Amino acid sequence: MKLMGVPLSPFVRKVAVVMAIKGLEYEAQPVMPGDASEAFRALSPLGKIPVLVDGDFSVADSSAICEYLEEKYPQHSVMPQGAEERARARFLEEIGDTRLVETASIIFIEKFANPTIFGKEADLERAAEAEHELLPPYLNYLESQVPPEGYLFGDFTTADISIVTPIFNAAYGGYCVDAARWPKYAAFVDRVAEHPAVIQVREAEQQFVTAMASSS
Ligand SMILES: N[C@@H](CCC(=O)N[C@@H](CS)C(=O)NCC(=O)O)C(=O)O
């Protein structure tokens, strides 16, 4: 199998963690977001990463990929059992993939990617607005959803990594969830970060970041 996309993408990281949990080996192909090549656009019509290639089959979109992996490779399930829990897991995944990524990415882009990768000046006002105004309403909601111990549905699921992977990006910009304001969610982020599959994926991510920093 091949996973296309850079490991710093919250969506690529989410898929990589699911693959690690399922013990699936893959070749990582570091395609940048928005890659305009005809070959990539044929696989990802929206131009977005990640894309999974599995033999003759390929699919884009992290949620579509994770659902495919769950159905095709059911070992070490990453979905809870039961209609209600699955619906809730998908909704939490959606929050992670949309509002959480949109707001946390501003901190990542302004305080890390722009100054470090793209050689652009950081817009610190925009980053502060994201941190203090845009992100908090979603953290308030997640604080009400995460358990005081363990994961969302017992065993680790796609939803667990989905509601944390955007925070890993913001952390590159020096962000840390305020444990005084969101104690359950801050502890949950730490717990997810300590999961062996997450550690494994983030080690590979670190190698990518180090290589990227030394080449820029
Ligand atoms: N819903 C998609 C979102 C993927 C996405 O937005 N990826 C970003 C990189 S983190 C991207 O490729 N952006 C390029 C673009 O929008 O042109 C998923 O879950 O995979």
Image (tube, rainbow, N blue to C red):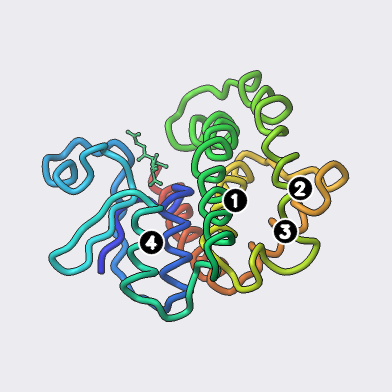
Upstream in sequence: badge 2 or badge 3: 2
- Graded by Cα atoms within 10 Å as few (under 14), some (14 to 19) or many (20 or more), the crowding at tag 2 reads few
- Graded by Cα atoms within 10 Å as few (under 14), some (14 to 19) or many (20 or more), the crowding at tag 1 reads many
Element under disc 2: helix
Instruction: Tell me if 149 is positioned left or right of 114 in this view.
Output: right
Q: Position of residue 151 (x, y in %)?
A: 67, 66
How far apart are the alpha carbons under marks 3 and 4? 23 Å
Upstream in sequence: badge 3 or badge 4: 4
Q: Amino acid at mark 2?
A: Ser
- Graded by Cα atoms within 10 Å as few (under 14), some (14 to 19) or many (20 or more), the crowding at tag 4 reads some
Pointer 4 residue: 67
Residue drawn at x 51%, y 61% as measured from the top left: 158
Q: Based on the displayed image, in which of its 4 quarters is residue 73 positioned?
A: bottom left
- Graded by Cα atoms within 10 Å as few (under 14), some (14 to 19) or many (20 or more), the crowding at tag 3 reads many
Q: Who is closer to the viewer here, 70 or 43? A: 70
Pointer 1 residue: 163
Upstream in sequence: badge 1 or badge 3: 1
Q: Ligand 1 quadrant?
A: top left
Element under disc 1: loop
Instruction: Tell me if 184 is positioned left or right of 205 in this view.
Output: right
How far apart are the alpha carbons under marks 2 and 3? 12 Å
